[in-house]
Amino acid sequence: MPPVPKIYSTYTTLYKVRAAIEGEPERLHEAMGYQYEPHLVPVWQDGPGGVWRRPERIISLKPFGLVPLKDDPDGADFRVERPIPLVVWSGPESDELKEKYGVRFRPPARMWRLPA
């Protein structure tokens, strides 16, 4: 995983999460706090000039089971117990994804990049 630039947000906390996407091995992913719960972020979209970024979608981790980790060698904060279905990770926007899996498309959150 490439290094993550330093970022700052007045909205949320960033987390590292161990999760498997359907058909793939478990690996580290970024997650953010949203409405007091960690949500997986599959894709970040850069804002104008790269000053901030925002998630294209976020996935609630509640339906997949979330285990807090201590002393993870890669610095993960949580591990997801069940694989994330591919349609949840990258499927088209739908009411089913919103209702069944807690997927939120273009949530109102921005992560500001700090100067190096």
Image (cartoon, grey):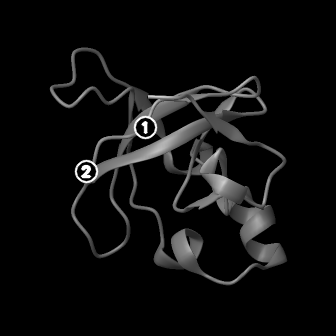
Badge 2 vs badge 1, beta-carbon distance below 8 Å: no
Q: Residues within 10 Å of mark 2 (few under 14, many from 20)?
A: few
Residue 1 drawn above or below residue 96: above
Give the residue furthest to the left. Answer: 73
The residue that appears at 66% across and 45% down in the rendered structure is: 52
Report the quarter where the C terminus lies: top left
Q: Position of residue 85 (x, y in %)?
A: 48, 71
- Which residue is nearer to you in this view: 4 or 50? 50
Asked if residue 96 is positioned above or below residue 65 in the image, the reply reads: below
Amino acid at the residue labelled 2: Met
Q: Nearer the viewer, mark 2 or mark 1?
A: 1
Residue appearing at x 32%, y 30% in the figure: 76
91 vs 64, left or right, is right
The answer to whether residue 1 is seen in the rendering is yes
Asked whether the viewer can see residue 47, the reply is no
Relative image position of residue 13 (x, y in whole percent): 60, 25
> Counting other residues with Cα less than 10 Å from the Cα at mark 1, is it few (<14), some (14-19), or many (20 or more)?
few
**Badge number at residue 5:** 1
Please state the horizontal and vertical placement of residue 45, each as a whole percent of the image: 62, 61
The residue indicated by pointer 2 is 1
Q: Relative to 10, is 39 above or below?
A: below
Residue at mark 2 to residue at mark 1: CA–CA distance: 12 Å
Give me the disc on residue 17: none
Quarter of the image where one finds residue 97: bottom right
Could you tell me which secondary element the residue under label 2 belongs to?
A: loop
